[in-house]
Image (cartoon, helix red, strand yellow):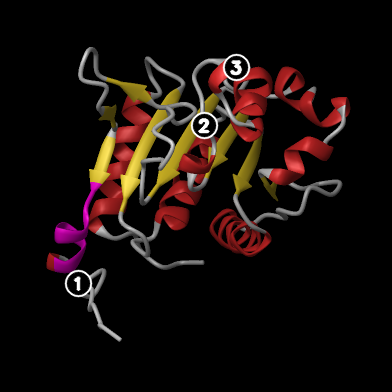
């Protein structure tokens, strides 16, 4: 895959790599359809090139999104990305985390893993007692064991108002702190997305 990065993607990659020098976590809010997966794959490519990671694990809310991540990462990295022998990584669903054995989770101890979470707002919680099941697994299995994490969301809020896993919030306002934002206005201005049309039926 040789498609060049959009300006916002290149800026986000630079911001993430800069933050990773002093923090393992990065949260990106970018409007749906802007190309978050392509940007995430580029971060993985650069971390692999500099020898800072060994493996990439991607998690998504559905099989369709996981398949899209698999194809994007495989294309950008020019590597096998199916979790089989010789693969540089795998994309799976949040629900699939419940069915992974200890051998899978030990990868985070044996290797330097870059963990990517697409549509992270599906995963709730900073506190295990207030987390949903997906958020609990991230807190218990990944948060403090991955070399780097990348949390992605186009709509970073929850109807139940619970905190999003891996997110930071201002105190006392409780506002989400994003490391990088690319909103709908910017996407329309850049012609990355078209203006939304609301049709009343």
Q: CA distance from mark 1 to mark 3?
A: 41 Å
* Residue 191, disc: 1
Q: Residue at x 51, y 66 (%)?
A: 1
The magenta stretch spans residue 183: yes
Q: Report the predominant secondary structure element of the magenta stretch.
A: helix
Q: Element under label 2? A: loop
Q: Residue at x 65, y 40 (%)?
A: 57
- Category of crowding for the residue at label 3, using alpha-carbon neighbours closer than 10 angstroms: few (below 14), some (14–19), many (at least 20): some
The magenta stretch spans residue 22: no
| Closer to us: 137 or 4 | 137
Q: Nearer the viewer, mark 1 or mark 2?
A: 2
* Residue 101, disc: none
Residue where numbered disc 2 is placed:
124
Left or right: 200, with 121 as reference point: left
Is residue 114 among what the camera can see? yes
* Residue 128, disc: 3
Kindly indicate the quadrant of the structure image that contains residue 128.
top right
Q: Residue furthest front?
A: 201
Percent across and percent down for residue 148 are 52, 26
| Closer to us: 61 or 50 | 61
Q: Nearer the viewer, mark 1 or mark 3?
A: 3
| Closer to us: 192 or 169 | 169
Is residue 44 shown above or below 170? below
Is residue 46 shown above or below 127? below
Magenta-tinted stretch: 182-188
Q: Element under label 3? A: helix
Percent across and percent down for residue 159 are 41, 42
Tell which circle, 1 or 2, labels the residue nearer the N-terminal end. Answer: 2
């Amino acid at each position: 895959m040789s498609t060049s990065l959009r300006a916002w993607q290149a800026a986000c990659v630079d911001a993430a790599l800069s933050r990773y020098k002093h923090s393992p976590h990065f949260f990106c809010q970018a409007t749906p359809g802007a190309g978050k997966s392509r940007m995430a794959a580029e971060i993985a490519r650069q971390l692999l090139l500099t020898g800072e990671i060994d493996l990439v694990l991607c998690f998504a809310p559905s099989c369709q999104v996981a398949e899209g991540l698999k194809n994007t990462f495989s294309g950008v990295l020019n590597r096998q990305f199916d979790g089989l022998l010789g693969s540089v990584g795998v994309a799976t669903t949040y629900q699939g985390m419940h069915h992974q054995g200890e051998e899978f989770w030990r990868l985070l101890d044996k290797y330097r893993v870059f963990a990517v979470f697409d549509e992270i707002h599906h995963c709730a919680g900073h506190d295990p007692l207030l987390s949903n099941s997906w958020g609990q697994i991230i807190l218990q299995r990944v948060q403090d064991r991955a070399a780097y994490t990348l949390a992605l969301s186009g709509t970073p809020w929850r109807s139940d108002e619970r905190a999003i896993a891996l997110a930071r919030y201002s105190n006392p306002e409780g506002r989400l702190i994003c490391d990088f934002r690319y909103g709908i206005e910017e996407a329309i201005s850049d012609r990355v997305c078209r203006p939304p049309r609301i049709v009343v039926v």
